[in-house]
Amino acid sequence: MNKIAAKAPKRMRRRLIASRLAPYLLLQVLIVLATILGLRLLQPSDPEDFALSGFSLREDGASRPVTLPHFTSSRYSLADPPLYTGAFMFRSNDAASGWSVYLPRFSNAVEVAVNGVVVLDSRRDFNANRPDRNTPQIALIPASLLHDGSNEIAVRLFVWGPLKGFLDTVYVGPDAALRPSYETRTLLFVTLPVAFSAWQSILAVILAIMWLMRRHEPVYGVLAGAMVLGVVQAFSPPPVPPATASRLAAVLLASAPIESALIVAFGVLFFGWRWPRYGMLLFAPGMIVFVVGLIAGPPLPRILFLVLGIPTVGVCLFLMACVTAAAVVRRQDAASFTLGCAVSIVLTCWVQDMLSVFEIVTNERIFVSRLSYSAMLVAIGAGLTWRFARALNQVDGFASQLVTRVREAEERLKASFTREEERARAAALANERSRLMRDLHDGLGGQLVSIVALSERGHEGASITDAARAALKDLRLVIDSMDDIGGDLMLALGSWRERAAAQLRPHDIALDWRVATPQGLPLHPELRPWHVIQIVRILDEAVTNAVKHAQARHITVTIETLEDGKGPYGVISVADDGKGLALAGEATATGQTARGMRNMRSRATRCGAVLDLASDSSGTRVRLQLPQVFPDSDGAAG
């Protein structure tokens, strides 16, 4: 049962692959048929009324009649090139229109003479001497060379391999009748390849820049390298024997197998697969052609290209077709379908070229692989560039959406912050009100209660007056503490100094005010009114104790800023020369004195300050060490 259950998923997977692969293969068959039909329909038509096909060929010391198109028997014939001799008829009444000789196709080079005078030599045109270019040639025949009746035309065919020499039908007639066919072939086999190569070079630069920007995606760099090789092949001038040419130029013309291997690497990487280690063997034939060509020089690169390069191109195209088919089965997306169709077209063109190379197709030698290959590279490069641009547009769209959302979030945050700020302001105001009410209750409230009690008990005069003055003093203290002092406690202490001096003056007590450091006390931006109230009340309590209980005659207030390892802090000291006080906790301490000392310590703790009290027979000393940073809430007092 387990074996049957294990085989079921495999059968389902095979059916799925077959259901996806069969329609794709059928589509490729249709594309191959359409490509073959297109190659037949797009075949340039020549003016058959002016065709010369019957010639006499002198080759290898022998002459024989031949019919064009014709393949020579030798692959190398520079010393004694084949000579085709024929004749054409000319009438003097046709001289006004101007006559030309037109050669649609030949390999490798031709020299055309009319009545013994050379009118055309293709070796002067570098583009016309490569077998893969299909470059036509046309030349005007000077009217002085033509005469009524039969005229002789001789075509010398220079062949330097590795393919056999080939001469297509020769056309001689009025230039107006031959020129359109020449221009059509020039457009198809000269202008169009140059345009594709130019686009290929532009896309190669764009893809190289994209690869430099995205090093983690080598697919762009691989395709750019393949395009660069294609451009080099297109624009490198071919060596024309017997002139000497650089070995590098001859080798670069045979770099097609390396280019094809790069295309296979691009396909593997493009579809998200890992490049196998043995895949580097695909580059071996191209490297052999390159190295041997540099060492030995021409014509060896051309021979190796024919033996190794062309089959390698076919193998790479077949592998690329397999890669795209596997991608179609796996991905089922437009990119794999499109690339698979392009590879099928190029593979069909390569097969057609091979049929021409092996002379299975004997009536023509038009190579279209290079043209279709360039078209495929341009299409792939344009597709990648378009995909990259679309990705950038998507990124820009996402960025704009993100900016919009960030703005909306920012607006919401601003509104929330405004609400929180209002709430915080309201809470702070409520806290200040609570503190103010508490301070009024603790100070002014107690004074008013004392006044009411004294009044009810029948006290008059100084007692009620003193209580009222104390209440008024406390009210002024609360009001003064609400002033904005900008964190400078010295301003509040200045106001307190005036009130303290007025309080001591009726008792003939001198107030000595000392500021030991130039800056007085440090600035505290976090200082709040309730901090000021607590500090001032501590100082008031110290002065009151000195007046009422210590019987002091002299009070010294010292203000200074000290420094420790953590930073500066302020110290306020109040010292008197009285008889001293019994501190809280001592047996001689009165209830009122002990309660006052506890209040002073409690207020200091609420402000985060440290209060030190010392008293003996020589006087009382109160030292208030302010914190470096005042607490934000009096809940810190614990």
Image (spheres, grey):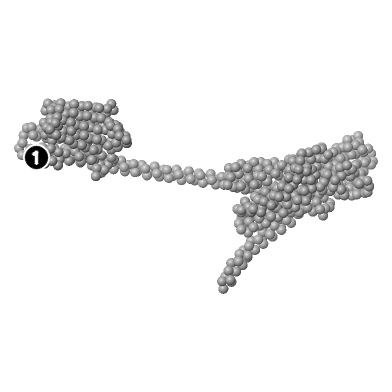
Residue 279 drawn above or below residue 477: below
Could you say where residue 274 lies in the image, as x and y percent from the top left?
61, 53
Amino acid of disc 1: Ala
Q: Residue at x 32, y 42 (%)?
A: 422
Residue 568 at what x, y percent from top left? 30, 33
Task: Please name the residue that numbered disc 1 is placed on.
Answer: 453
Which quarter of the image is occupied by the C terminus?
Answer: top left
Q: Secondary structure at mark 1?
A: helix
Query: Could you tell whether 333 is left or right of 628 in the image?
Result: right
Would residue 104 be visible to someone looking at this image? no
Number of residues whose C-alpha sits closer than 10 Å to that of mark 1, classed few (under 14), some (14–19) or many (20 or more): few
Q: Nearer the viewer, residue 301 or 165?
A: 301
Camera-nearest residue between 59 and 443: 59
Pick the residue in front: 615 or 544.
615
Q: Residue furthest left?
A: 458
**Is 449 rendered above or below residue 512?**
below
Q: Quadrant of residue 589?
A: top left
Q: Is residue 374 visible?
A: yes
Q: Quadrant of residue 83?
A: top right
- Residue 619 is left or right of residue 17, and the answer is left
